Image (cartoon, helix red, strand yellow):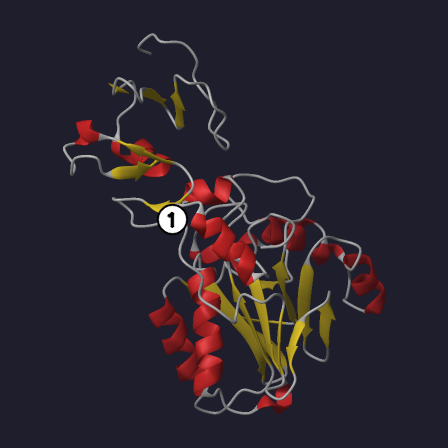
Amino acid sequence: REDGKPMCIIVLKREESGPITPKQWEWLHHCWDNNHDGAGFMFREDEVVRVVKGLMTWERFEERVKELWRDGPGLTVFHFRTATHGKVSPANTHPFPISKDNKILGSVDVLCDGALVHNGVLPIPLDKEHSDTMLFVRDYLASFSRISMKEVRLISLLEGKFIILTTKHTYMIGTFEEEKEANWDFSNKGYLTAYPKLSKNAFLHGYGGWLDDDDEWRGALAKMEVCGVCKEHSPFLTTATSLGLQEDMKVCKTCLRDLFVEGDYYGEEDSFIVEGDRIGTFDSFEWGTYHNLEGGERK
């Protein structure tokens, strides 16, 4: 996480780094564990850039990397996504070829002249379907006739960290964590440890993803319990015996929303109602992006 926002992670394996070691596979696995909305990578192949992405499980990611490492690709850029905008889908994973064509941008194996990965959130017009990075590449970056230091300086004014890989150059924008002996670089420290998986409630309240400071993590987790349904940490749990679950089982608000149907009314002391994708309790506390529904009447 950075500035309270869920973050992805970019990994640069430099040309001189050699074969991936067991320790480096562990780093990559941590990146996946902390950012598991899809992965991809890019490298140079036969004087073009090859983008391989849409890898929606760790097993598939590992398989594709090992398939392409038979001839030992050198410099490689990996990306592990935590979705902030757009659907969780293969097409929305990084890298994105520099193109205005949605089909090319979403392709899971493509050759191109250049591609980009991003770690952060971009201040551009968005829609519900596409990644903000995909829209940035399609609507802005692809308008440049070529990528040079002039364009890179403009991109550096935006929020986040980037790597642009072209047939000739590698542009690294932002401050990266460097593992000097390994010749690997990371856009944040999410490669060091696989943190506990947190519920969507935790993301809504500024807990999800990862934090630089392990003490912050311990402090955050100390305030949370584990949901009896999804087994994830959440700062907001409630007892729901009307589900037919184990008596006094604590359930997070996300699971309540998923398990209960629209219009239902549950409980006495801890009463709440469900309306579409909104859930609220009668004690009128504010909860994430879900609007509280006030009043004591059944909706």
The residue under label 1 is 233
Residue 292 appears at what percent x and percent y? 45, 21
Q: On the rendered structure, is 212 left or right of 33?
A: right
Which quarter shows the C terminus? Answer: top left
User: Which residue is depicted at the point 78% across and 62% down?
Assistant: 145
Instruction: Pick the residue in front: 95 or 27.
Output: 27
Residue 266 appears at what percent x and percent y? 25, 21
Q: Quadrant of residue 166?
A: bottom right
129 shown above or below 116: above
132 shown above or below 90: above
Instruction: Pick the residue in front: 168 or 191.
Output: 191
Q: How many marks?
A: 1
User: Which residue is depicted at the point 45% across and 69% down?
Assistant: 30
Q: On the rendered structure, is 291 left or right of 156?
A: left
Q: Residues within 10 Å of mark 1 (few under 14, many from 20)?
A: many
Residue 76 in view, yes or no = yes
Which quarter shows the N terminus? Answer: bottom right
Q: On the rendered structure, is 231 left or right of 32?
A: left
189 shown above or below 138: below
Instruction: Pick the residue in front: 216 or 91.
Output: 216
Task: Tell me the kind of residue under disc 1.
Answer: His
Residue 148 appears at what percent x and percent y? 81, 69
Q: On the rendered structure, is 114 left or right of 190?
A: right
Q: Quadrant of residue 215?
A: bottom right
User: Which residue is depicted at the point 65% across and 62% down?
Assistant: 98
- Circle 1: element type: strand
Residue 39 appears at what percent x and percent y? 47, 65
Residue 109 in view, yes or no = no
